[in-house]
Every structure is written in structure tokens, then in C-alpha cells.
């Protein structure tokens, strides 16, 4: 008899963004004349930068030529892209990361979801609350969580991100082994300071723990004092894996390209306390289960780092940041407390009422889709997340509609 992985039965009914998409589809079916403005899932709306498109085209033409055609590429990614990333994103910013510590992939969602496979089944896991649901659900699937009770899984350690701690949790008093951090944060939009991040690196070193640092929104950081990579903090190479993505940086949500940095100094331990380097483990996993990102996509990603590519992606991110600033100022003027939106495309709005109720109200009265904070965890109750990914004119219209509706 074929049996299922019963850990899946512990999962909440559906993935948050799928659930929202169903609700919006049902609303649209019932109200075909109501135009809906989507500020829910963080999906980009503007075209790929010109430099990426040109590189993409050139690479596709190469694939049409027997002499230049490429079959399987290296699972870890082509050297041209890994070297470019290492230089521009890390070495030029004083972070000692080498090209062979970078693994190119098709998304930070997949990587943050898959990475847990290389760790023990009985480790103590700390996740922020509110949290990007992938961190929690993938550990539930792997059997690292108990029953779901009162909005939380037993067996997971939740790091409350609240107004009291400025939405940046400090390291816990009790020891944990694997720590998920995301900054600029999804969903709150709050960034972490150098000192706050240093406290986490120090904690991980002291407890032989590991930090999974999701920096998918790093390109939105405009405050030069803020760290863009965890490797800007001394000692982080030994205790942190970092995830990056071109999805929001350069509009690659549909094109698919991201990368994960696993420094060779990063260690974890077996049952008898023997050290093992995580680079080898992740490399083994990656080569076994992944065949690399397509060549044209990697060429398009490389072009992000050209002079024109840098200017164009900066302009793209600035565009969404302008949306974020508008959302922040309008929601604040309507009397809501907001955080995020300055070094991030997300605005975390305290609705002072049930999150799903607020979600429904905005959808039904204003035709605007947001994301209910409660969907990200217990501490998200009472909040909604508004995403800045849309056309500026649509954001203006959405804000005007909300003002009228409330
Ligand atoms: C979000 O809206 O939180 C993100 O777009 C989801 C994702 O990147 O997977």
C-alpha cells in the first residue's frame, strides 16, 4: 500500500498566496465589472531592463548556432555569472566571498525551501513571526514541527517581531540551532542594522548555530549605513548562508534566476560532534537534484551587472520605491501606523482590526488586493501588507479608492 508523508497533513490548508488568489478570483467572478488593483503578492509589473533583454536575445541566437550551442551547463551556474556576482555583490563591498561559493538557482523560494534537507531532523528551528510561509511549511513537510495550535506549530521557536522590538527580534535566551532571518523583511519591510545583525552572528558563533539569511530584497536598501549582506559582519562566513534573488532586483519573477552563498567555512556537526562543511553537502544536493538555470537566463542575469544594467535596475527599483513612499504617506495620512517601505517594497500597515476582515473590506469596497498579516503568523494579526509592485498610476488609484472606501 502506498503511503503518504503524513507531515503534509499538518500543513495549513493551502499556501497563503494561493489562498488569496482563489479569494480574488471568486470576487472577480461575482463582480465582473469591478476592476481589481493587485497590491498583494510581490510580483513585478515592469519589463526586464534593456541590458538584460539584449543579452537574453544574444544568448538565444547562440543556442540557434551549432557552433555556439550549449547543452547541460554546470549545476552550480556558469563561471561568468558566479564571478561577476562575487566581485560586484560581495568583494567590492568588502565581503570575502569567492565565485565557487555561489550556487546559481531558479529562485530564492526554492533554495530557502530546499536548504533544510541538509540538516538533522531533530534540530531546534527559530523562525520569525510574522514569517515568509516557505520557511515554516518546508520544515513541517520534513517533520520538524508538531501540531498546529493557536496559530503556531509546536516544536518551532517563534521570534516575535512586534512594534515593541521595532519588528527586529533579538537572539533568544535559549539555544536554537537553525535561524531564519529575512532583511529587508518580508512581510514587515523593516531593515536590520549592522549592530542588530552582529548580535545574531555573535549568537550563532556562541551556540554553534547557523543563520539562513534571506536577502532577496537587498536591492531596495538605500540607507548606506545598513548592511546589504550578512558577510559584511565579521565572523558571518562561519555561521551564515545567504539567499539572493534577481526576481525583485531586475524583474526576474517570470524569468527565474537567483543564487545562494554557502561559504566554505560554514560548518555543521554530526551526532558525535564532528564538523562537516555545508558547502560540500549543498553542492552534493544541488548536483543530485538540479540541472542548472538555462544559459540565456544566466546571460540575462550577468547583464544586470554591466554599466547600463546597473543604471537600469537602479531605475527599476527606484520606481517601486516611489510607489512604496506614496503608499506609506497616503496610509499614514489616513491615520494608520505604517512601517517598511523605505528600504523595502513592502509596507506593513497596522489596521487595528482583524487582518482578514481588513483584507475583505479593501477588496470589496475598494477593489484593492493586499495580503492579510495574519497569513504570515500570529504576530501579523491586525496588520496588512501592501506591496509596491504595480504601476505608479495604479498605486495612485488604489490609494484614492481606499481613501474613499474607509
Ligand atoms: C511575496 O509576495 O511575499 C513574494 O512575492 C513571494 C515570493 O517571492 O515567493
Image (spheres, rainbow, N blue to C red):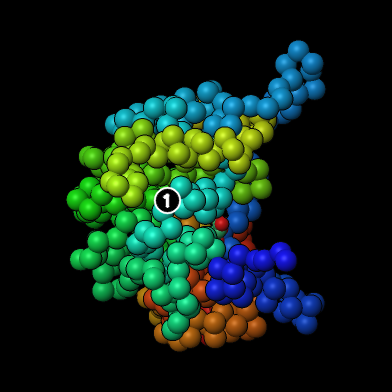
The residue positioned 49% from the left and 64% from the top of the image is 143
Q: Position of residue 32 (x, y in %)?
A: 80, 77
Query: Is 207 in front, or is 230?
Result: 207
State the residue position of label 1.
119
Q: Position of residue 330 (x, y in %)?
A: 46, 71
Q: Residue 348's image quarter?
A: bottom left
Q: Secondary structure at mark 1?
A: loop
Vertical relation: 250 (above or below) 364: above
Q: Position of residue 58 (x, y in %)?
A: 70, 24
The residue positioned 30% from the left and 41% from the top of the image is 274
The residue positioned 33% from the left and 50% from the top of the image is 271
Q: Residue 258's image quarter?
A: top right
Q: Is residue 370 left or right of residue 153?
A: right
Q: Residue 181's image quarter?
A: bottom left
Q: Residues within 10 Å of mark 1 (few under 14, many from 20)?
A: some
Query: Is 56 in front, or is 69?
Result: 69
Residue 349 visible to an observer of this rendering: no
Query: Is 304 in front, or is 13?
Result: 13
Decide if ligand 1 comes within 8 Å of the CB at mark 1. Answer: no
Vertical relation: 229 (above or below) 191: above
Quarter of the picture containing the N terminus is bottom right
Query: Looking at the image, which residue sits at the far top?
Result: 67
Q: Position of residue 62 (x, y in %)?
A: 73, 21
The residue positioned 53% from the left and 28% from the top of the image is 81
Residue 162 visible to an observer of this rendering: yes
Vertical relation: 61 (above or below) 23: above
Ligand 1 sits in which quadrant?
A: bottom right
Amino acid at each position: 500500500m502506498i503511503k503518504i508523508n503524513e507531515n503534509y497533513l499538518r500543513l495549513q490548508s493551502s499556501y497563503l498566496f494561493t489562498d488569496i488568489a482563489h479569494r480574488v478570483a471568486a470576487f472577480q467572478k461575482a463582480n465582473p465589472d469591478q476592476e481589481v488593483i493587485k497590491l498583494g503578492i510581490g510580483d513585478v509589473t515592469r519589463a526586464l531592463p534593456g541590458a538584460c533583454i539584449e543579452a537574453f536575445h544574444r544568448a538565444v541566437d547562440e543556442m540557434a548556432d551549432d557552433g555556439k550551442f550549449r547543452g547541460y551547463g554546470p549545476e552550480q551556474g556558469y563561471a561568468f555569472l558566479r564571478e561577476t556576482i562575487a566581485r560586484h555583490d560581495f568583494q567590492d563591498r568588502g565581503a570575502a566571498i569567492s565565485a565557487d561559493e555561489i550556487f546559481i538557482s531558479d529562485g530564492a523560494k526554492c533554495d530557502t525551501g530546499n536548504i533544510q534537507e541538509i540538516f538533522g531532523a531533530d534540530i531546534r528551528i527559530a523562525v520569525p513571526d510574522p514569517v515568509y510561509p516557505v520557511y515554516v511549511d518546508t520544515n513541517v513537510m520534513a517533520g520538524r514541527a508538531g501540531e498546529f495550535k493557536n496559530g503556531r506549530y509546536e516544536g518551532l521557536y517563534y521570534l516575535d517581531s512586534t512594534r515593541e522590538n521595532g519588528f527586529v527580534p533579538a537572539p533568544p535566551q535559549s539555544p536554537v540551532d537553525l535561524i531564519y532571518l529575512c532583511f529587508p523583511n518580508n512581510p514587515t519591510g523593516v531593515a536590520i542594522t549592522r549592530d542588530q545583525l552582529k548580535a545574531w552572528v555573535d549568537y550563532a558563533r556562541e551556540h554553534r548555530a547557523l543563520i539562513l539569511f534571506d536577502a532577496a530584497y537587498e536591492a531596495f536598501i538605500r540607507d548606506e549605513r545598513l548592511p546589504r549582506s550578512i558577510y559584511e559582519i565579521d565572523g558571518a562566513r562561519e555561521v551564515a548562508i545567504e539567499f539572493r534573488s534577481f526576481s525583485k532586483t531586475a524583474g526576474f519573477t517570470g524569468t527565474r534566476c537567483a543564487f545562494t552563498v554557502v561559504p566554505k567555512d560554514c560548518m555543521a556537526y554530526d551526532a558525535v560532534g564532528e564538523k562537516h562543511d555545508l558547502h560540500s553537502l549543498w553542492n552534493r544536493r544541488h548536483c543530485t537534484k538540479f540541472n542548472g538555470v538555462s544559459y540565456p537566463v544566466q546571460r540575462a542575469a550577468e547583464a544586470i551587472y554591466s554599466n547600463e544594467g546597473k543604471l537600469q535596475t537602479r531605475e527599476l527599483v527606484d520606481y517601486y520605491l516611489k510607489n512604496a513612499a506614496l503608499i506609506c504617506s497616503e496610509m499614514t495620512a489616513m491615520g494608520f501606523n505604517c512601517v517598511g517601505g523605505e528600504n523595502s517594497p513592502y509596507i506593513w500597515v497596522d489596521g487595528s482590526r482583524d487582518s482578514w476582515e481588513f483584507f475583505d473590506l479593501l477588496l470589496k469596497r475598494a477593489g484593492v488586493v493586499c495580503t492579510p498579516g495574519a497569513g504570515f503568523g500570529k504576530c501579523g494579526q491586525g496588520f496588512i501588507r501592501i506591496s509596491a509592485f504595480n504601476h505608479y498610476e495604479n498605486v495612485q488609484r488604489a490609494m484614492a479608492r481606499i481613501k474613499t472606501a474607509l
